């Protein structure tokens, strides 16, 4: 996936500075600043990372390292309904891969991508701690257990009419 240049408006820059200031521009609070910034913007493109680095007096390389190390952070926008398929051992053994393939087929996107309409994105998780319900799919904070490829269209249908 190619990197898209993001144009930040002054109000966006001001918001990032405000978030950093809430943490006293403390380099030790970098992860908290990044969490709050991602909560506000939905993702952390390079342009945002640069301002966070400047405001917390941390190198851009360190900020990028933190963003790419922790799976919670994303540099690409997620869909309004982020779909996460657990691919931990229990889920994998019980067919998570076929469920993932069905989501990709029905939505026409790959893992890490967002649908053109901005509604859906697909990611994989290692374990959600609900192994007894394997395979598990999460859409936002909602968990679906014992999902089969046949159940994928029902899950998507729940969000098609939501607006």
Image (cartoon, helix red, strand yellow):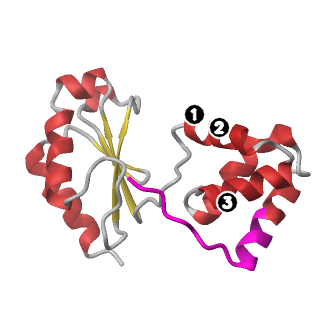
Residue located beneath label 3 in the image: 48
Residue located beneath label 1 in the image: 69
Q: Is residue 9 magenta?
A: yes
How far apart are labels 2 and 3 at the CA level?
13 Å
User: Height in image: 33 above or below 148?
Assistant: below
Could you classify mark 1 by the number of other residues whose Cα lies within 10 Å: few (under 14), some (14-19), or many (20 or more)?
few
Q: Is residue 26 left or right of residue 8?
A: right
In terms of secondary structure, where does tag 3 sit? helix
Q: Which residues are magenta?
A: 1-16
How far apart are labels 3 and 1 at the CA level?
17 Å
Looking at the image, which is closer to me, 101 or 52? 52
Q: Is residue 33 magenta?
A: no
User: Height in image: 107 above or below 70?
Assistant: below
Q: Is residue 12 left or right of residue 58?
A: left
Q: Residue 99, percent across and down?
A: 17, 42
Could you classify mark 3 by the number of other residues whose Cα lies within 10 Å: few (under 14), some (14-19), or many (20 or more)?
many
User: Height in image: 26 above or below 115?
Assistant: above
Q: Residue 95, percent across and down?
A: 15, 31
The quarter of the picture where the C terminus appears is: bottom left
In terms of secondary structure, where does tag 1 sit? helix
**Label 3 vs 1, first from the N-terminus:** 3
How far apart are labels 1 and 2 at the CA level?
5 Å
Q: Residue 130, percent across and down?
A: 35, 31
Q: Label for residue 66?
A: 2
């Amino acid at each position: 996936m190619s990197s898209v240049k993001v144009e930040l408006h002054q109000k966006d820059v001001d918001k990032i500075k405000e978030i950093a200031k809430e943490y006293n521009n403390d380099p030790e609070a970098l992860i908290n600043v990044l969490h709050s910034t991602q909560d506000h913007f939905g993702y952390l493109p390079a342009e945002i990372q640069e301002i966070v680095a400047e405001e917390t007096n941390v190198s851009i390389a360190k900020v990028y390292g933190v963003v790419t190390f922790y799976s919670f952070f994303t540099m690409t926008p997620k869909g309004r309904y982020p779909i996460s398929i657990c691919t931990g051992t229990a889920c994998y053994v019980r067919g998570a891969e076929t469920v993932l393939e069905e989501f990709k087929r029905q939505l026409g996107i790959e893992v890490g991508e967002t649908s053109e309409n901005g509604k859906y994105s697909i990611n994989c998780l290692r374990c959600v701690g609900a192994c007894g319900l394997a395979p598990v799919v999460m859409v936002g904070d909602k968990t679906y257990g014992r999902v089969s490829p046949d159940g994928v269209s029902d899950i998507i249908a729940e969000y098609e009419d939501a607006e």
